[in-house]
Image (cartoon, rainbow, N blue to C red):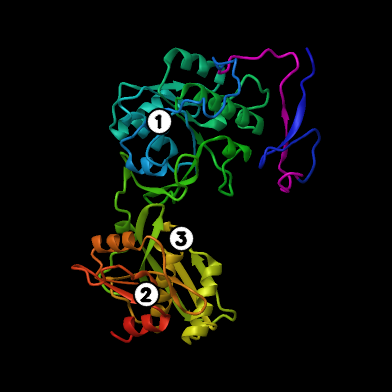
Amino acid sequence: MAKAKTAYFCQECGYNSPKWVGRCPSCGEWNTLVQEVIEKEDKKPGVTWKSVNLASRPKAITEIVYENEPRIITKDGELNRVLGGGIVQGSLVLIGGEPGIGKSTLMLQIALTLSDKRVLYVSGEESEQQIKMRAERMAYQSDKCYILTETHTENIFRQIEEFKPEVLVIDSIQTMQSTYIESGAGSVSQVRECTAEYMKYAKDTGVPVFLIGHITKDGSLAGPKVLEHMVDTVLQFEGDRHTTYRILRTIKNRFGSTSELGIYEMHGAGLREVSNPSEILISQRDEPVSGIAIGSMMEGNRPLMIEIQSLVSVATYGTPQRSSTGFDAKRLQMLLAVLEKRGGFRLGVQDVFLNVAGGLRVEDPAIDLAVIASLVSSYEDKFIPASVCFAAEVGLGGEVRAVNRIESRISEAEKLGFKKMYISKYNSKGLELDRPQMKVVPVAHLDQLFMDLFLGQ
């Protein structure tokens, strides 16, 4: 028998080296190269997915016949949104998240609710009895969802050729093992090879494939970075395991927007869609508190009303602290400098703490005006009425700048019962300012906001 060949692979980017080096020449990370056994010289290839169209040839783009196949619309509206309108035929979707966050629960729930499609759920981590227990707990029944507990791709593709599923779920890609590679399951070469086999199967047959993936301790998807380049869509399942809410965020999508997110609530009976997330992102209080402001942000095509919480207090331990959760720390520093220079507030000797309620990460600049209002409210210890919200960007000169999709933001605020909304003066053209349920107040500079908001109380 010929001697097995070995090579060193970078666990971050998949770089291949014949010898070990301390720093990866490709991505620059230290101590990420691990030794793996690659294909033996005398090993016969195992059973993998074989394309039926072996005699492929180049075609002029005008010769290619394009059929606009409808997407598979699931009963999960949040998943449909993040995928861009439903599951695309022949797509390869990777779902990553922390252990215990609910990835397997989400995909089993999707598999059970696709009652009009033959779904094959392949698990390399749980037994059939464990999956049945979860399905019983979720109270979903489907005679078209089939379970296969297997890790070798050779056996899986034998069952696929016989079963011919319409949707395939792999849980998880790190447990799969290909006969072409001698290294253990979860290694860089195994993950890459198995993903390549499932990708070829999806493209040849038009069957959508969902891959569940683990993440590393720093939050990135485990395996080589090339894994994210190979798949069509990358979804990140986020949230705190100690709270009930989960966020499904789009990282990459070849068939839709990468700005969409879906929100779920974890129950004992599975995951429940949150159709109106603004209600859970805004705290309910019995009495008004200073430092609280409601801002309007956009995630893809969805407007969200979120709560900004600020605490400004005198620094008693030397250097003032600047801490933000869910909001860019550098942008917070910029807004504090604008308040100091243009507003005359002495914030240089104050500790400033900022928090976005609900665990969201905010990148929409339209939240600037709400942050400014929240900071001044805490500094002056004057509360902002609960019926007031904000949607505008703030410039370095203290000017209030226009933002996009202002009509959608106003409609969402009006639907949730807000009575007054501050926007940029340059957004007000063509808008109806005095609405039946809400008044829209355009402002051009921060001075106008402070005069109307705080001095008018």
Distance of mark 2 from mark 1, alpha carbons? 44 Å
Q: Amino acid at mark 3?
A: Val
- Closer to us: 191 or 401: 401
Q: Earlier in the sequence, mark 1 or mark 3?
A: 1
| Displayed quadrant of residue 426 | bottom left
Distance of mark 3 from mark 2, alpha carbons? 23 Å
Does 51 sit above or below residue 417? above
Q: Position of residue 384 (x, y in %)?
A: 32, 76
Query: Which type of secondary structure does the marked residue at label 2 adopt?
Result: helix
Mark 2 lies on residue: 425
Q: Amino acid at mark 2?
A: Lys
Q: Nearer the viewer, mark 1 or mark 3?
A: 1
Which numbered circle lies on residue 68?
1
| Displayed quadrant of residue 135 | top left
- Closer to us: 123 or 278: 278
Instruction: Mark 3: give few (<14), some (14-19) or many (20+) Cα within 10 Å.
Output: some
Does 155 sit above or below residue 94? above
Residue at image location 43% in from the left, 57% down from the top:
360
Magenta segment: 24-49
Q: Does the magenta segment cover residue 187? A: no
Mark 3 lies on residue: 362
Q: Quadrant of the C terminus?
A: bottom left
